[in-house]
Image (cartoon, coloured by chain):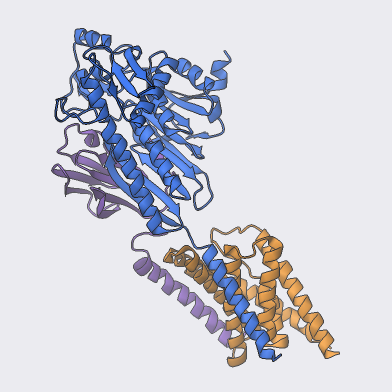
């Protein structure tokens, strides 16, 4: 191999490194292929917020305005739950913590959905 | 005499390239990296380039993709599109290097051919699946193209003297 | 001919092939949409060729479900002016006169009656009075007195529902009786929505109506649909997964809707036999090609002991069930052997139906 060949090998390796950095910061902020897990919060069918899990804060409470009133969503490590909801039956609060991809908390009267999403979801859907 | 020899060699290149192409498509990929291949078929493209130049190398590359995909039943399928773009881009780049940058050895040309092959494939793939998510694999494929290009380059280098013997 | 023409022709051919290839193998479009309908969250995911057509198909499918919802909604204040839904109208006329109803409503009622007969009353759409007593679907829930339950039970009898198919008329014989289509409407609506999607030429569809899953067509990656079944005692987990193919999976569980009264949990599936929440199973999942039938049967089987449930399921063609019994047993009917994969490491005992029904 000539000198130029070694130069080539090194530059390709460097290019690969640059692309790796590029990937992290340019292409994959939303976690297209990476296995980042995130909590998606939707109100009345509209996505209003995405939170990457686990959050930096150990505990975090988020207030969300739903159809009936303000709901409080609590984050702890990788888990999320509906902490408070103005709805009558409190089904979403009873649902308690969720953490695995594909799981969701659905509050029908307040029209709020919290979903855990990840690129690699083991199932197409879960029947419950 | 020369013409006959050229004809035979090109026929051989196309045949070998087709066989290698089919072979590589048949052997399952052991790496968790889609599209990572040794690119053995690149050997004949490179041989054709060094022996007979630009036009012949392009013809050999295109023909082996065509015949290879016809044989493995992937003609016009997504994998055909990937092979075609990969072969096209890599043959092009190898030609440019061979003619305009004499500083590179056969192995260097082969390495950049392998890298270009992967890039070409990824570009075609991103067009097909309409997502740039696929470029996530690019750095890994580039790294992989180093040993792959090196080994095919080495084989080419070892083969050349036999062909050049009159 | 000039040599250049050969090159030109070759290039044109190659370009043509490449363009053709890209056109043919362009990835399918996908549309996902969600709406709050039928007292739950309905999400539809479809794939096909054109974005616009898919959007239209999904909106039409939601529209169809909305239509069924409006026909079957029981909770309009029963009064002369505001009673517009078909079911509400039949309920207000109970014991008085027959009401002519929409053909979809009539079809649902016929289906409901058929399965009521088949299950010996385990499925009963005249359960309205009992549900009202327990207060499900309303803001206030309470445990009724035994006497009230007895009174309400006397009004629950599907045999007192008279269906006349000459003019699609419906009559509840006794005053105070009322229909509740909670165990069928969602599934029936899902079936109608799927039909709409198919008519609009979608290539694949995944319809999730609050955990009632229907799949149709082939996924883009050509793999079978994998549907997890929620662990009834650990909402974050599944007990296993089903591989489905143009089928629906509907689960009835004791964990979805409940209230706690004096330290006891009371869930929303009331047995038409006892008048209290059914306690034989924690959950029952039914797999069938028709989502309406899967919906009916999941409610039906939930009320029954699994041995009786299996007898019903094994008699029916193309219907299968998975029971998670109250004593932590997972039992599957014979048809699920190929389709169900249990998740290891769960604290349940596992049985396949062959062992049960042959004994």
Judge left or right: residue C213 versus residue C220: left
Judge left or right: residue C208 versus residue C198: left
State which quadrant residue B10 falls in: bottom right
Q: Residue furthest right?
A: B1
Taking the spot 55% from the left edge, 76% from the top edge, the residue there is B116
Against C170, residue A121 (above or below) is: below
Image spot of residue C259 (x, y percent): 22, 25
Q: Can the viewer see residue C126 in this picture?
A: no
Taking the spot 51% from the left edge, 35% from the top edge, the residue there is C341
Task: Say which quadrant the C terminus of chain C sits in.
Answer: top right
Image spot of residue A123 (x, y percent): 44, 43
State the orange chain: B
Judge left or right: residue B14 versus residue C226: right
Task: Say which quadrant the N terminus of chain C sits in.
Answer: bottom right
Against A51, residue B70 (above or below) is: below
B119 vs C48, nearest the viewer:
C48
State the purple chain: A
Q: Residue furthest front?
A: C166
State the blue chain: C
Image spot of residue C346 (x, y percent): 44, 31
Q: Can the viewer see residue C242 in this picture?
A: yes
Image spot of residue C165 (x, y percent): 39, 22
Taking the spot 47% from the left edge, 63% from the top edge, the residue there is B129
């Amino acid at each position: 191999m000539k000198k130029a060949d070694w130069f080539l090998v090194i530059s390709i390796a460097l290019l690969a490194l640059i692309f790796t950095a590029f990937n992290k910061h340019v292409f994959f902020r939303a976690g297209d292929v990476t296995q980042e897990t995130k909590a998606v919060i939707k109100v009345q069918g509209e996505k209003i917020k995405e939170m990457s899990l686990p959050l930096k804060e150990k505990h975090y409470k988020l207030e969300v305005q739903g159809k009936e009133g303000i709901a409080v969503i609590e984050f702890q490590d990788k888990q999320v739950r509906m902490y408070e909801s103005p709805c009558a039956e409190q089904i979403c609060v009873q649902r308690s913590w969720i953490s695995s991809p594909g799981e969701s908390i659905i509050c029908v009267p307040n029209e709020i959905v919290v979903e855990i999403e990840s690129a690699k979801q083991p199932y197409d859907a879960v029947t419950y | 005499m020369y013409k006959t020899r050229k004809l035979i060699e090109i026929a051989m290149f196309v045949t070998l390239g087709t066989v290698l192409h089919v072979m590589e498509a048949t052997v399952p990929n052991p790496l968790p990296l889609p599209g990572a291949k040794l690119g053995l078929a690149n050997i004949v493209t490179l041989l054709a380039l060094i022996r007979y130049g630009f036009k012949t190398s392009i013809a050999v590359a295109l023909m082996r993709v065509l015949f290879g995909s016809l044989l493995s039943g992937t003609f016009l399928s997504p994998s055909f599109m990937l092979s075609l773009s990969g072969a096209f881009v890599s043959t092009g780049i190898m030609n440019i290097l061979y003619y305009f940058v004499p500083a590179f050895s056969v192995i260097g040309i082969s390495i950049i051919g392998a890298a270009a092959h992967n890039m070409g494939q990824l570009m075609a793939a991103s067009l097909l699946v309409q997502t740039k998510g696929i470029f996530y694999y690019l750095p890994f494929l580039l790294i992989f193209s180093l040993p792959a290009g090196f080994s095919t380059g080495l084989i080419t280098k070892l083969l050349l003297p036999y062909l050049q013997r009159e | 001919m000039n040599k250049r023409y050969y090159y030109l022709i070759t290039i044109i051919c190659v370009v043509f092939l490449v363009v053709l290839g890209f056109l043919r193998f362009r990835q399918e479009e996908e549309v996902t949409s969600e709406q709050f309908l039928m007292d739950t969250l309905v999400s539809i995911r479809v794939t096909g060729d054109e974005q616009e057509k898919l959007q239209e198909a999904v909106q039409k499918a939601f529209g169809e479900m909305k239509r069924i919802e409006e026909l079957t909604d029981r909770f309009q204040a029963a009064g002369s002016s505001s009673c517009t839904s078909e079911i509400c109208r039949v309920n207000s006329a109970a014991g008085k006169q027959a009401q002519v109803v929409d053909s979809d409503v009539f079809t649902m009622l016929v289906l409901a009656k058929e399965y009521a007969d088949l299950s010996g009353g385990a499925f009963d759409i005249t359960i309205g009075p009992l549900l009202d007593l327990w207060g499900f679907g309303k803001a206030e829930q309470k445990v009724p007195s035994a006497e009230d339950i007895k009174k309400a039970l006397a009004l629950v009898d599907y045999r007192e529902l008279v269906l006349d198919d000459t003019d699609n008329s419906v009559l509840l014989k006794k005053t105070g009786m009322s229909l509740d289509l909670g165990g069928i409407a969602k599934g029936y609506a899902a079936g109608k929505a799927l039909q709409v999607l198919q008519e609009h030429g979608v290539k694949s569809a995944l319809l999730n109506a609050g955990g009632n899953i229907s799949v149709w067509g082939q996924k883009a990656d050509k793999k079978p649909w994998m549907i997890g079944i929620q662990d009834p005692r650990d909402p974050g987990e599944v007990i296993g997964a089903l591989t489905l193919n143009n089928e629906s999976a509907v689960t009835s569980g004791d964990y979805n809707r409940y209230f706690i009264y004096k330290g006891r949990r009371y869930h929303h599936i009331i047995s038409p036999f006892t008048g209290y929440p059914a306690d034989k199973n924690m959950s029952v999942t039914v797999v069938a090609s028709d989502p309406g039938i899967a919906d009916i049967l999941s409610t039906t089987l939930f009320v029954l002991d699994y041995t009786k449930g299996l007898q019903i399921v094994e008699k029916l063609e193309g219907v299968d069930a998975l029971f998670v019994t109250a004593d932590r047993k997972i039992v599957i009917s014979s048809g699920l052997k190929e389709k169900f994969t249990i998740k290891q490491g769960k604290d349940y005992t596992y049985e396949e139906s062959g062992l049960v029904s042959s004994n």
